[in-house]
Image (tube, grey):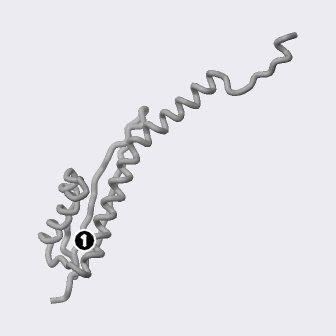
Amino acid sequence: MYRSLQSQRGASFIATLIVLAVLAYVVYVGMQYVPQFIESQSIGSILYSMEDTQRSEPVENTDEARDKVIRLLQMNNMDDMTDKFAIMNENYGLTITFDYDRTLDLLFEKKKMHYEKSAHLNLRAR
């Protein structure tokens, strides 16, 4: 009779363990994904900066553009990305493209994440 008068309050120990396991997994995945997201945003910022400064401090050829991108990567402590971009000379401009892969470990599988961002720089008519 004493047991029937008491009702359970709060979560059981098993439910608490399940919630903690799910939270730990979310934190584990987040600790891998957040740096990749920040890296992608930094590259987007570099490309935006290249497009924005093209009006005031224009680059005239692929070598100048490559030097400027490398300098911006170094300023952002992203030296490992210096071999992940290409500059193509197209009609009346240059296209800068970052193309790289990262791996996201989900414990039960490794997921390949592909990132690609590009920007176009108009060259002045000579």
Residue 48 spot, x, y in % from top left? 32, 69
Quarter of the rendering containing residue 42 = bottom left
Q: Which residue is painted at 29% across and 74% down in the image?
A: 51
Q: Residue lying furthest left in this view?
A: 63
Q: Tell me if I can see residue 5 in this picture.
A: yes
Question: Considering depth in this image, is 107 or 60 the residue closer to the camera?
Answer: 60
Quarter of the rendering containing residue 112 = top left
Question: Considering depth in this image, is 77 or 93 the residue closer to the camera?
Answer: 77
Q: Which residue is painted at 81% across and 18% down in the image?
A: 6
Q: Residue lying furthest right in this view?
A: 1
Quarter of the rendering containing residue 5 = top right
Per the image, the residue denoted by label 1 is 95
Question: Considering depth in this image, is 110 or 74 the residue closer to the camera?
Answer: 74
Q: As displayed, is residue 50 above or below residue 91?
A: above
Q: Left of 44 or right of it: where is 66?
A: left
Q: Which residue is painted at 29% across and 70% down in the image?
A: 49
Say which quadrant the C terminus sits in: bottom left
Q: As displayed, is residue 20 above or below residue 96?
A: above
Q: Left of 124 or right of it: where is 49?
A: right
Say which quadrant the N terminus sits in: top right
Say which amino acid is labelled 1: Thr
Residue 24 spot, x, y in % from top left? 49, 33
Q: Secondary structure at mark 1?
A: strand
Residue 4 spot, x, y in % from top left? 85, 15
Q: Tell me if I can see residue 91 in this picture.
A: no
Q: As displayed, is residue 110 above or below residue 52?
A: above
Q: Which residue is painted at 22% across and 74% down in the image?
A: 94
